[in-house]
Image (spheres, rainbow, N blue to C red):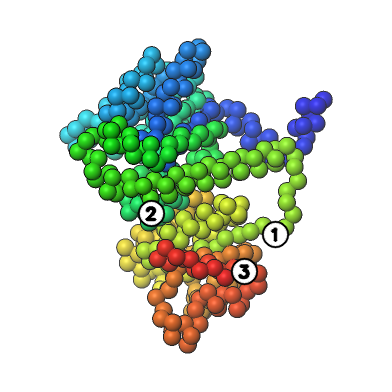
Amino acid sequence: MAEAAERRRKSPEQILKEIERSKRGYFKLYIGAAPGVGKTYTMLREANDMLAEGVDIVVGVVETHGRKATAEQIGALPVLPLKPIEYKGRTFYELDVEGVIKRRPQFVIVDELAHTNVPGSKNKKRYEDVLEILDAGISVLSTMNIQHLESLHDIVEDLTGVKVRERVPDWILDVANEVQLVDLPPEKLLERLKAGKIYRPEKIPQALEHFFRPTNLIALRELALRELADDVDERLEEYREDDGAEEVAGASPKILVLVSDGGNAERLIRRGWRIAQRMKAELFILHVPTKPADRLSEAERKKLREIEALAKILGGKFFIRAAGGRPVIDVIVEFIKENAITQVVLGQTGMSRWQEILHGSLANRIMERTRFVDVLIVGNGQEKNR
């Protein structure tokens, strides 16, 4: 009777979510602030403990990066063969997803979640391999660094000068049942680097001059700690909802990102997504074209497809609203009112201060024609908030 009463307090959506999750494998993700903090080592050590307790756990793929201590940590764990794939006259080896599912262990180790598979693989990204394995009812242990999260791409590039090419969507953290931060103070990480425990000797000077500068490591560590703190907050909120706690009263925040086909659209979308995540808000992305669709160049069409794809990856709702001869500001204000937007994110324009005085900035015109709407201007790494 007590169990039935508990179930009655949950919404149908929550019950369906629990049922769906019960069919999938358990997913534990080890996250670090930078290479060499010990994610794979920690994962393998815990995997060997599980093996000693009788758990059927195997290695699907482990990237040791030539680190002897990591390779030794594989220990007695059974290692499944990798799948050979021919590409441009060379043979590459990737995770054998079909082999893992056929073997059906209780747990499988799949290192480096952000890895891009070689062309010809079943899935483009390794995280897609993991999702397929989880759907088959097999549990997964995996690793990744914080800089591979899609929404942190611009922030990491600004901090470190490094453009991270292998990225995963942030919702992967929601898929994970458990997220563990593997932390190491920057000074200890630098000691490991200088001792040759992370990269080969010839790569150490370059690493020290670029990614592994102390200021970079401190900033990345702060990002990792903050991201995991946010994740804990979200999980606690979810548990409270599952326990039947009442929602906080008040208007639901909604974030609108205004994008053009310019080069800063992705930056704006990622910034808007992070704001939406922290505010637990819906994310809208709006593009108001300045010319008809049939007059767009192929490069402009490609850019719009890329913008829409990123919006989809981050779970935002992407809209294109043609002005049809009307002023663009009319279209924007109409959209804001139709969707009860509470905050607008837009990029810094190329207008001079005199042009803004004579014609009015877009931000000012939005604020003049709406009520209770905040405007955030993003440009060149700086923000101005109303």
User: Which of these two is toward me, 280 or 34?
Assistant: 34
Residue 40 visible in the picture: yes
Task: Residue type at mark 2: give it.
Answer: Leu
Measured in 3D between alpha carbons, the distance from the residue under mark 2 to the one under mark 1, in whole angstroms, is 35 Å
**Number of other residues with Cα within 10 Å of mark 1, as a class: few under 14, some 14 to 19, many 20 or more:** few
Task: Residue type at mark 3: give it.
Answer: Val
**Number of other residues with Cα within 10 Å of mark 2, as a class: few under 14, some 14 to 19, many 20 or more:** some
- List the single residue furthest toward the left: 89
Q: Which mark is residue 87?
A: none
Q: Which mark is residue 159?
A: 2
The answer to whether 31 is drawn above or below residue 255 in the figure is above
Q: Which is more N-terminal, label 3 or label 1?
A: 1
Asked if the residue under mark 3 is in contact with the one under mark 2, i.e. CB atoms within 8 Å, the reply is no
The residue drawn where x is 19% and y is 38% is 202
Measured in 3D between alpha carbons, the distance from the residue under mark 2 to the one under mark 3, in whole angstroms, is 30 Å
Asked if the residue under mark 1 is in contact with the one under mark 2, i.e. CB atoms within 8 Å, the reply is no
Residue 107, horizontal then vertical, whole percent: 47, 22
**In terms of secondary structure, where does tag 3 sit?**
loop
Quadrant housing residue 282: bottom right
